[in-house]
Amino acid sequence: MSVRILLADDHPLTRTGIGEFVKKEPTFELVAEAEDGIKAWELLQSLKPDVALLDIRMPGLDGVTVAQKVKNDGLPTAIIMLTSYDAQQYVIASLRAGARGFVLKTVSPKELTTAINTVAKGGLYLDPEVASVMGEQDFIPEQLSVREREVLLLAAKGLSSKEVAKRLFISERTVQTHLASIYDKLGSRNKTEALLLALKYGVVTLEELLEDD
Amino acid sequence: MFSFFARPRSHFLAFLLCALILPSATVVLVAVFSMLSQERAMEAAVSSYVQDLAESMSYHLSSDTDAWTFQMLSDFTRYPFFSWGPSIPGWVALTDHNGKVILASPGASNINAIWKPDLPVGQAVRITDKKGAQYTLAVYPVKRPSGGYVVAAVSWSNLLGGLVSVIRLWPVLIILITLTSFVSIRLLWTKLVIPLQALVAEIDSMTLGTDVPDELEDGTIMEIESVHDALMRSAQAAIERDNLRNSYVKDVVRAQEQERLDMAREIHDGPLQDVTALLQQIHMTLDEDDDESAEVRIRRAEIIAKSVVRELRALCDELAPPWMDLGLSEAVTELAERLSQGYDIQIVSDFDDASRELDIDNEKILSLLRIIQEAVSNAVRHGGASEVHIHFRMSGNLVTMMIADNGKGFDAANINHETLRVEGHRGLASMTERMSLMGGSVRINSKLGKGTNIIASFRV
């Protein structure tokens, strides 16, 4: 059975490029194209595709908002954000809005195929450019301790070190130590990257990140 | 016309005229009144005097036919009436029943001029002779067989000559008062009203920021001079302010041009070179004599194209980071992480619950991002800092952003903003400007060896 795909992007050239590639792939079926967010949302509701490739910046509704609507309405479509922006906060915002994938437009066809297949099966796909360990191709992260996972999840929710310390009844200093250890194990340089890498390597799940405390 | 009732634009001169004319008019009115009552009192006194004189003379002549002599006539000062004051010149005469003078005191020579047959008897009257001279006179009958009358009279022009001339002087006095009033008004007009109007005209025609008021003429009154001085001070302040603004605008324009230059250089050295290289690879691929395989060329082109995208993305971020759309805390976190990577230092950003949820417009977010950029750049380049903490706190509607570094700090108390500005270092100034545009303020605390704290606050 082929994967039914919706493509939403306001740039005709991008739509043509990505569309041509999707059509060429035998297991993919491009069911609709949209040039703005409102059209995309209408098509998502009526066609209920398996996967939607959404641009972030679009007229009408932006991609993150469309993803949020899909999540709120419980539509069966897995969302991949397809964007020119490499900001990690966009990744976090997209994931919070329910997207399962984040891919830059510079992606190679091979990577896009992987991304579409991964999210279609319920997985999570992040573009290597937004979540990669510098210099290492096949990086296997060291396991995080239970405490480190807790610290990472709380920090990922935007809590400051002080607040994390208060929540876990430990000192702020200990929180800093844990974070340093987490960064080291995951090969990240900051909180957001640590979180993205932890998601990428399955150290934490998207559900854990999104659940409210 | 002076409009006394058209408030609030009552004319100044109208008040001046009132102030001067009202007292003068009052003086004149009071004087006229007292003059009239004085004349009335005088007339009453003169009437009763001539009546008394005539009556008593007639009585004496009636009762004692041998007693009346010139002696008695010339000695009328012994009558009680004259005891109180200055002698009043007058005369007395005895006439027959036809008005022919039988006997008269000196000065009574013109009795014929005023004699009228129908003069009332026993009562003082005021009459005017043919020459216009006035007399008060009384006629009493003499009860003697030969009959006749006693006529007593006082000439107003003789008797009251002095008083009358004083009365005549009043119009002169009034004219004098009026004249001095007009001189005063003229003085006030030239010394006060005209200079005031000139000042108003000057203020109206002055272009603030370029003009100063003209010098005053000599002899200007003090109050006008102080108004003029105050105007001069504010005009000079406006000029200084304008100069400051001009140099500020010049700075901003220079900074803008510098930014454009930098941007052009970056585009030229980066994407433009890369796209040129890309084009070359494509040309080579199309060239039939090419040694390399098309695939190698295209793979090379792919790498170059990716690099172009990265460079353009970085340029976009520098111009206006698109991720500020995400909201304050996300944008600050993103920037902090980018700066942290870029400068290879530790940057921690943290928000309390209220500031994390804060929803402010992109313009303000961008301002805060620029301040953070500037602060971190200063901390690293000038302070050699290895750690920067960015805290956001919100209490009530006051948002406070504190940027603290562990750099070597500077002597904030002795910093010369003007020198910095002239040397093209607009960092601290632009932080202050950005915050004041947001209706907020910036405080910079720093001491040598103690790092730097930048506290920016604004209300939402």
Image (cartoon, grey):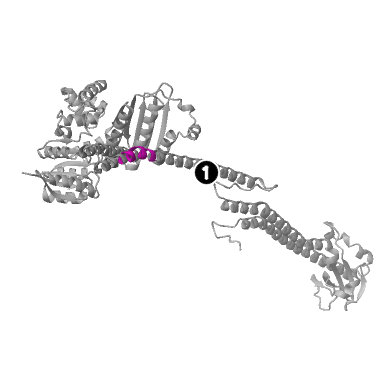
Residue B286 in the magenta stretch? The answer is: no
Residue B128 vs residue B322, the one in the foreground = B322
Tell which residue pokes out farthest to the left in this image.
Answer: A1
Identify the residue shown where x is 45% and y is 41%. B252
Dominant SS in magenta: helix
In the picture, measured across the screen, residue B128 lies left or right of residue B282, that is right
- Quadrant assignment, res B333: top left
Quadrant location, the N terminus of chain B = bottom right
Residue B266 in the magenta stretch? The answer is: yes
- Quadrant assignment, res A187: top left
From the image, tell me which residue sits under label 1. Answer: B242
Q: Position of residue A204 (x, y in %)?
A: 15, 29
Q: Position of residue B267 (x, y in %)?
A: 35, 40
Give the number of callouts. 1
Q: Position of residue B326 (x, y in %)?
A: 27, 40
Identify the residue shown where x is 81% and y is 72%. B127
In the picture, measured across the screen, residue B229 lies left or right of residue B357, that is right
- How many C-alpha atoms fall within 10 Å of the one at disc 1: few (<14), some, or many (≥20)? some
- Quadrant assignment, res A21: top left
Going by the numbered disc 1, the residue's amino acid type is Asp
Residue B68 vs residue B77, the one in the foreground = B77
In the image, is residue B211 above or below residue B183? above
Tell me, yes or no, if residue B122 can be seen here: no
In the image, is residue B22 above or below residue B416? below
Tell me which segment is drawn in magenta: B264-275
Q: Position of residue B24 (x, y in %)?
A: 69, 57
Question: The residue marked by circle 1 belongs to what chain?
Answer: B
Quadrant location, the C terminus of chain B = top left
| SS at circle 1 | helix
In the picture, measured across the screen, residue B144 lies left or right of residue A156, that is right
Tell me, yes or no, if residue B448 can be seen here: yes
